[in-house]
Amino acid sequence: MFSYQNGIKIENTSLWLDAGMRVPSSVVSHAHLDHAKKHQRILATGPTLKLLAKRIGKTRSLKLEYRQPYTFDNCSVTLYPAGHVLGSAQVLVEKDGVRLLYSGDFNTTLSCAAEPIEIPESDILIMESTFGSERYRFPAREEVEKSLIAFVQHAFDAGAVPVVVGYVLGKSQEAMKILGDAGFKLSVHGSVAALARVYETCDVTFGDWRQYHRDETEGRVLIIPRVAIKSRMIKRLEKKQIVYLSGWAINPQVAERMAVDQALPLSDHADFDGLIEYATKVGAKKIYTTHGFKGFARELSVRGFNADLLSEANQLSLF
Ligand SMILES: [Zn+2]
């Protein structure tokens, strides 16, 4: 039904899913750049298209609504919310009576700045496995959110500027939402602000925030992408406390390696248990794993799933 070579190609159609190079037509599951290229035509949700226009520029596109089947060549394509970042989608392809689900990146835990995940059933599943190792079990999200709020309050109490570091798309807006809703005033890096404005056009609001200006940091939380940690914007702050948000923060060395005061495991991906829960709900007869720990297919196999690592080497055996 499909082949795999730097992206998923649906057989006997011209359709790709998250193609890793420019192709005539590809579904783009979400606007992170390891999944999105500037294809001749992009099929994606409205929010993803808006975010991509900011990130890689406008291109010919087709906007797909969640849950609305779309006929492409001789197959049907339906997107379902993936809970990862705003606009993120799982892709269900139906062809010759067989269903193939491609998960894209997903999160089974509810995020305050992404559509809640809806998991469809499928015959074949291709799933991400970013945190597909047993050591990645995240604390309850409310606990992580509380820890973030406590960190920021503690920094202010100590007379320091709280600085929150997260990925520019998704994590930063989630931090804006959590802290904005908690009543903190925010000052955000220009790259974060540009994407936050897209979120606002999709009815996600962030409280009292403005784009960073060096004379207006007093009493505000700074939210920046990782690349800005060593920038003058941060170096010039005399007293600051920096927190890094990432699922990788489960590893105890992360705070030290990132040279930050604290690292918190706020993730936009499912943790190990979330991945297993997802595979169970999809109920596929065959699972291929991609984008993550290579050993995750084995973890699935020992739990009774028929699973293999998706690779170019095994593409000839694929349905
Ligand atoms: Zn992603």
Image (cartoon, rainbow, N blue to C red):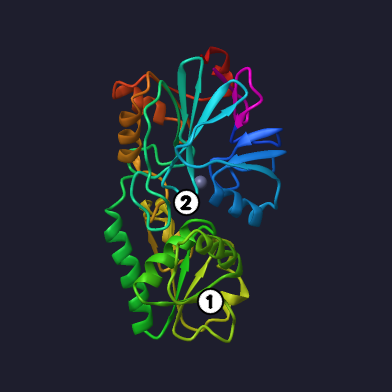
Q: Within 10 Å of the Cα at label 1, are there few (<14), some (14-19), or many (20+) other Cα atoms?
A: some
Label placed on residue 210? 1
Q: Quadrant of residue 62?
A: top right
Between 111 and 270, the one lying in front of the other is: 111
Measure how far apart labels 1 and 2 are at the Cα level: 21 Å
Is 25 above or below relative to 142?
Answer: above
As helix, strand or loop, the secondary structure at mark 1 comes to: strand
Question: Is disc 1 in contact with disc 2, using a CB cutoff of under 8 Å?
Answer: no
Q: Residue at x 62, y 23 (%)?
A: 73
Choose between 41 and 33: the one closer to the eye. Answer: 41
Q: Dividing the picture into quarters, in which one does residue 81 lie?
A: top left
Which one is earlier in the sequence, the residue at label 1 or at label 2?
A: 2
Q: What is the x, y in percent for residue 285?
A: 37, 18
Identify which residue is drawn at 71% across, 37% down.
22
The residue carrying mark 2 is 85
The residues colored magenta run 1-16
